[in-house]
Amino acid sequence: MLCQICGKTAASVHFTEIHDNQMSEIHVCERCAEEKGLHTPARKHKFDIADLLAGMVDSMTTTDDDRVGHVQCERCGLLYSQFRETGRVGCAECYSAFKFQLRPLLRRIHGSVECKAKRPARDNGDVSRSRQIQRLHDELQRLVEREEFERAASVRDEIRRLQSEPPEPAEKE
Amino acid sequence: MSPDPGGLGPPRDFGELVSRASPWLSGDGPHGGMVLSTRIRLARNLNNVPFTHRARDEQLQGVVANVATAARSSPSFDHSLLLQMSDMSPLERQVLVERHLVSHELGDGTRPRGIVIASDERLSVMINEEDHLRLQVMAPGLQPSEAWSVADAADDDLGQGLDYAFSDDIGYLTSCPTNAGTGLRASVLVHLPALVILKDIHQVLKSVMQVGLNVRGLYGEHSDWMGNLFQVSNQTTLGVTERDSIESLDRVTRRIIEMEEKARDRMLRDARVQLEDKVWRGYGELRYCRSITSREVIERSSVVRMGIALGLPGLCPIRVVNELLILTQPAHLQRASGGEMTQAERNVYRAGIVRERLEAAERDAGHAA
């Protein structure tokens, strides 16, 4: 698929735009995305990793497909190409890691990507705290890998502090 | 739905559980003449553990322990029974598969997997199937709304003690993206012999799929719909609320029932004798057979079930034919006979069970009269 802006290069950035309640899918190339300011920091980060990994494998024949296949979930290590083979993601975090690949897929499957599900019983503070702890765990792992032990220690203390707080009572309708 | 319709109290172990008939086959639910059962399934995962196929065995063991603990403090799972697949023999696991309590995937027994079964077998939760939790509610007849209420409450109960993988923009995160969002699969098992005989079924199936529901034969695909049993279910889990899915399933199923009723009326009007002949021949084969295959049981019980639903006098209660579908399957037969059998021996043994069941029903009817 060619970029919808320049019409020349293969589109490698795919996302959905919502405007006046109308959703449209946009497929553009990296350069146009950059020029039009369509990159959010998170998206840029993911594609940088993908570029890097794909480049390491074969810089001559890197196609769009190969590149997307190398996007990896940082928490469970699943590659997008593995998901494509099995049709199963590896963990909850994969939905964020493969967000730009999964969104169009979810739309094709369900005709919508809007969440209308009931909320978990253990919602509100408790759920967001658990998300926060998970994020800190991920950060801790990265810091340890980079041998930044001083910062890792303070992140570990923060995790302990959050874990020792009493759970907030769940609110039910 | 009453929590314990049979008033039997909770089963204490596997043996006691399987000695009872599955309550959701009782045939006494709304539209029981056409709708065998309603099933609600909710897929849930724990936030901090990789999904089942990526998790290590010790992580899965942790999931079993966490879910069991959450179930113990949940009112919905009062007096429930936890069965660990690794503690059970292949035959016992297969019995649970045949009772529709456990999926084939869960029944393979190679990884830490289990099931918590609430006192009346209508509510259960499979642990470490494709998703960490597969909560399911089974109800006789057409009662999606009632079954959903049970599932919703049990989900809230378990959710108090478990940290579900949930995101604000998608909903419940599942191993397969086809379930992400509500994680809900609501389905009904409908019996549509008249639509099949009158060859209107293709049109009906096509219309059902056009309105976004999924429909497939319970046994067999394409035009070989053994037993004329079809499973209708919702397909989408994103962009819809749970209530939307439940209501659409209910609405469409009622429309299918109307069409089947019209087809049955037409058959009664235009070919009553042939219809009655077919029903009674089917009953006769079941009642007096000396060797019978699974397929024959499924097919003969289909015509008999239609005869019962049409109110032909002298036949057994619908519960009896529904139960035959489960009791005459290989693992149930093997368990009842207490040993391995060849296919020929199994057909003879199956015939014995079928005759016995129908004879007992006739005796009961005689006593009642």
Image (cartoon, coloured by chain):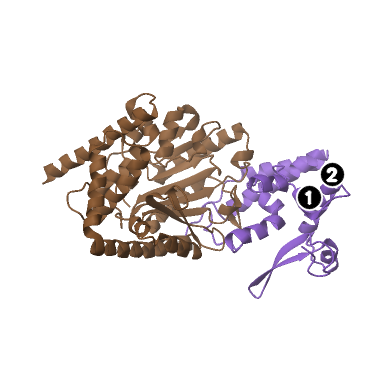
Chain colours: A purple, B brown
Residue that mark 2 sits on: A57
Residue at x 50% of width, y 65% of height: B210
Q: Which mark is residue B330?
A: none
Q: Residue furthest right?
A: A60
* Mark 1 neighbour class, 10 Å CA radius: few under 14, some 14 to 19, many 20 or more: some
Q: Residue at x 24, y 46 (%)?
A: B281
Chain designation of label 2: A
Residue B130 position within the rendered picture, expressed as x and y whole percent measured from the top left:
56, 43
| Above or below for B120 versus B195 | above
Question: Which is more toward the observer, A120 or B271?
Answer: B271
Q: Is residue A21 visible?
A: yes
The amino acid type, in three-letter code, at marker 2 is Val
Mark identifier at residue A66 = 1
| x then y, percent, for residue B94 | 44, 34
Residue drawn at 33 percent across, 52 percent down: B1
Circle 2 packing at 10 Å, graded few (<14), some (14-19), many (20+), is few
Q: How many marks?
A: 2
> Which residue occupies the foreground of this view, B330 or B240?
B330
Which of the two discs, 1 and 2, labels the residue nearer the N terminus?
2
- Residue B226 is situated, as x and y percent measured from the top left of the image, at 39, 48
Tell me the SS state at disc 2. Answer: helix
Q: Quadrant of residue B335?
A: top left
Subunit ID for the residue under disc 1:
A
Viewed as shown, does residue A11 lie left or right of B27?
right
Residue in view at x 80 percent, y 39 percent: A145
Q: Can see residue B13?
A: no
Tags 1 and 2 touching, CB below 8 Å: yes
Q: Are marks 1 and 2 on the same chain?
A: yes
Tell me where residue B153 appears, x and y as whole percent: 43, 52
Q: Three-letter amino acid code at disc 1?
A: Asp
